[in-house]
Image: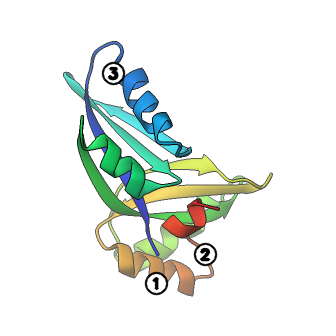
Amino acid sequence: MAITQISLFLMNQPGQLVEAVGAISDTGSNIRAMSIAEANDFGILRAIVTDTDLVCKALKEKYLVNCTPVVAARMDDRHGALYPILAVLNESNINIEYMYAFTGTGPEEAYVVLRVNDVETAEQVLHAGGIDTLSDESLKL
């Protein structure tokens, strides 16, 4: 039930981001969340999109692309909402490599995207703790 995150490796130069986002837009897929991490010479654009298969296929023609399973855990859009998610994962010794968040479609809804060392176990312990997660199928709705 994990979602697929698309990671693009881009040169750290003007025009690279707009070109990459344009390529995603050209597929007709909606960008639901995005994060950019930078190093000296390159950046990593991480995106959650509504049609990962289509976007991955289209981008592989031009970019170095990695499609990775990640967990998107639902939380209320309020202070303190992230803590229970992190606590459940910590109790099960799930390591979080990185994370970023985005708001959902409801007024009080948010999600945290987590790159973890064990996606399947992370989803199991989150669900056991009453925390919902997204799937690629749910992003298409």
Nearer to us of marks 2 and 3 is 3
How far apart are the two marked residues, 1 and 3, measured between alpha carbons?
38 Å
Q: Of the two numbered discs 1 and 3 on the same chain, state the one appearing first in sequence.
A: 3
Please say if 8 is above or below 132.
Answer: above
What's the amino acid at mark 2? Ile
Which x, y percent locates residue 82?
A: 59, 59
Task: Categorize mark 1 by other alpha carbons within 10 Å: few (<14), some (14-19), many (20+).
Answer: some
Q: Is residue 69 left or right of residue 40?
A: right
Look at 68% across and 53% down and name the residue there.
Answer: 104
How far apart are the two marked residues, 2 and 1, measured between alpha carbons?
10 Å
Between 54 and 16, the residue placed more toward the observer is 54
Identify the residue under disc 2. Answer: 131
Q: Of the two numbered discs 2 and 1 on the same chain, state the one appearing first in sequence.
A: 1
User: Across the whole image, how many numbered discs are drawn on residues?
Assistant: 3
Q: Is residue 62 left or right of residue 52?
A: left
Between 62 and 124, the residue placed more toward the observer is 62
Which x, y percent locates residue 129?
A: 58, 82
Q: Residue furthest right?
A: 107
Nearer to us of marks 1 and 3 is 3
Q: Residue furthest bottom?
A: 128
Q: Secondary structure at mark 3?
A: helix
